[in-house]
Image (spheres, rainbow, N blue to C red):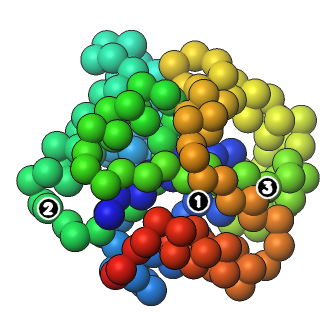
Amino acid sequence: MKIGLTGTFASGKSLICQILQLKHGFVYYSLSEEVRDECERRGLPPERKNLYNIANELREEYGPQVLAERIVKRIKAEKPKNAVIDGVRSPEEVWELEKMKDFNLIAVDAPIELRYERSLKRGRAREERQSFEEFKEAERREWEGGNQNIKGAMSLAKIKIVNDSTKEELERRLEEVLKSLNFKG
């Protein structure tokens, strides 16, 4: 089974990836890691703004599906039994991933205030210094701006998880989703 995750920033996608990896043995792939690697090659810090700009550059040069193509190529070469693909940000990426057998897209969301609080706590990529207004503006850009269209990607998901409670509740909701997909392990 291949599961792709799309959703709003700090909604719990990484936590779902961890649960799938640790509890169910999924192999982790990340479209964002492809961008982080490119950031590193260019000698730029992996800050959200740099990641956003580089991802858009790659999409403009090679097409909006480029990151998904790279991941599909890796998955086909490595042939994991189960894979989770994090960071799906556009319909074109979804369509590319849907070419794989047994692919399911899950959209993850949570209230914006809760996501902002989570982003401050995790302190990734200098998020701890971001104001709520800056957070909302960054989200607006990624929602349907540039070459990223999280809104469009989320609209293609047949499954949606709202992560507005505890880690345990998120895990329970994920288990329900896996059961509905007839996941056997």
When the figure is inspected, residue 56 is found, relative to residue 135, above or below; the finding is above
Label 2: which residue?
79
Label 2 and label 1: CA atoms lie apart by 23 Å
Helix, strand or loop for disc 3: loop
Label 1: which residue?
13
Q: Earlier in the sequence, mark 3 or mark 1?
A: 1
Residue 111 relative to residue 151: left or right: right
When the figure is inspected, residue 91 is found, relative to residue 183, above or below; the finding is above
Q: Badge 1 local density, few (<14 within 10 Å), some, or many (20+)?
A: many
Label 3 and label 2: CA atoms lie apart by 32 Å
Q: Badge 2 local density, few (<14 within 10 Å), some, or many (20+)?
A: few
Name the kind of residue labelled 3 in the image.
Answer: Ala
Q: Quadrant of the C terminus?
A: bottom left
Residue 25, quarter of the rendered image: bottom left
Q: Quadrant of the N terminus?
A: bottom left
Q: Badge 3 local density, few (<14 within 10 Å), some, or many (20+)?
A: some
Name the kind of residue labelled 2 in the image.
Answer: Lys
As drawn, the label of residue 110 is 3
Residue 97, quarter of the rendered image: top left
How far across and how far down the image is residue 96, in percent?
Answer: 32, 33
Give the residue drawn at x 75%, y 59%.
162
Give the residue drawn at x 39%, y 13%.
60
| Front-most of residues 166 and 134 | 166
How far across and how far down the image is residue 91, in percent?
Answer: 49, 28
Residue 138, quarter of the rendered image: top right
| Front-most of residues 30 and 171 | 171
How far across and how far down the image is residue 54, in percent?
Answer: 43, 27
How far across and how far down the image is residue 116, in percent?
Answer: 82, 53
Residue 89 relative to residue 119: left or right: left
